[in-house]
Amino acid sequence: KILFECTDEDHFLTTSQILDILEKQYNIPTHRTTIPNDIAVLKEFGMDIQVVRSAQIRYNLISREFDYAELKMLIDAVASSKFISKAKSEKLTAKIAALAGQNKAEELKRNISVERRIKTDNEKVLLIVDAINEAINQGKKIRFQYFEYNVKKEKKPRLDGYFYRVSPYRLVWNGDFYYVVCCKDKYTELSSYRIDRMASAPEIMDEDSTPLPKDFDMDHYLNTMYHMFSTERRQVELICTNDVMDAIVDRFGEEVKTYAYDMEHFRADVEVAVNSIFYTWVFGFGGKVQIKEPKDIKDECIQIAIKTCENLTGKTVALSDKDEK
């Protein structure tokens, strides 16, 4: 424990320092000849302890379960997560930093900033996650209330405090929020709910969850969603400029079906949950991604663009016959 907390690849403890810590912090008096024997036992156990023989023998723990870069990555993930409150982020990052030892922990904590991140104020998030995870493992339904904000930014129970009863299947981190993918009672389509919008930890019910079809591909389902909006899935043909291939692969994976279209464009055949978030994603490319087929989806996208233009300009927009073609 002493070596884990006080040493690393750059910091050592001498025999005298170890003896001093044992006696002052743990009330364990010992002799300097005992230390080398104890170190030998720890090394035999598998701890990567370095012994440096000089005027004073020095010891340090070299390798750890997580290296410095891995701990920094975990801390950044926690600090950036919107579903974890600011107070909980600070506690978690301190715990993660401690895995690096006292000296490196200070370096890690100096690089952390969560002050300007938009964080949830729901302190019950981890309890909610734990309850849902337990329900999934047990194959049981859950019951919970959901809240939303009114125009005064006040939290109000949705549907006058209605209790949702769902079969939970998967916890998903998407777009900086945590969701539970589930099926509501008396429905066959999947839904998703944000964890931080649940009023409290859900009740785990005695009733068994409704099982998913054996051939249901959850990963495929999740890859075709946009910000976890559960809507109808359609096959859509996109025409994209060659320079957005990275974005298409990032969105749909390396298995996405793409074909050469012309010298400057390629065609992508994708399955998507068609909703306003999908259209927003298309608009975000500034014309570099176009919907070619099916026509009804293309027409709906056009109508959204027209409505947006009318709202911005205050003028009615009408398409000519040429534009419609």
Image: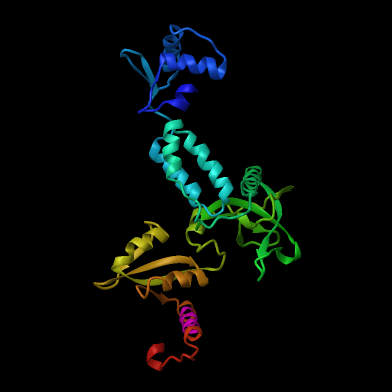
| Residue at 37%, 91% in the rendered image | 322
| Residue at 47%, 73% in the rendered image | 279
The residue sitting at the left extreme is 263
On the picture, is 314 further left or further right than 51? right
Observer-nearest of 254 and 195: 195
The answer to whether one can see residue 101 in this image is no
Magenta stretch: helix, strand or loop mostly = helix
| Residue at 47%, 49% in the rendered image | 113
On the picture, is 27 further left or further right than 162? left
Q: Position of residue 178 (x, y in %)?
A: 56, 53
Observer-nearest of 161 and 299: 161
Q: Position of residue 263 (x, y in %)?
A: 24, 72
Verify whether residue 22 appears in magenta. Answer: no
| Residue at 42%, 26% in the rendered image | 7
On the picture, is 208 further left or further right than 292? right
Observer-nearest of 68 and 320: 68
Q: Which residues are magenta?
A: 301-309
Q: Position of residue 179 (x, y in %)?
A: 58, 55
Verify whether residue 302 appears in magenta. Answer: yes
- Position above or below: 307 against 78: below
- Position above or below: 102 against 258: above
Quarter of image, res 36: top left
Give the number of marks.
Answer: 0
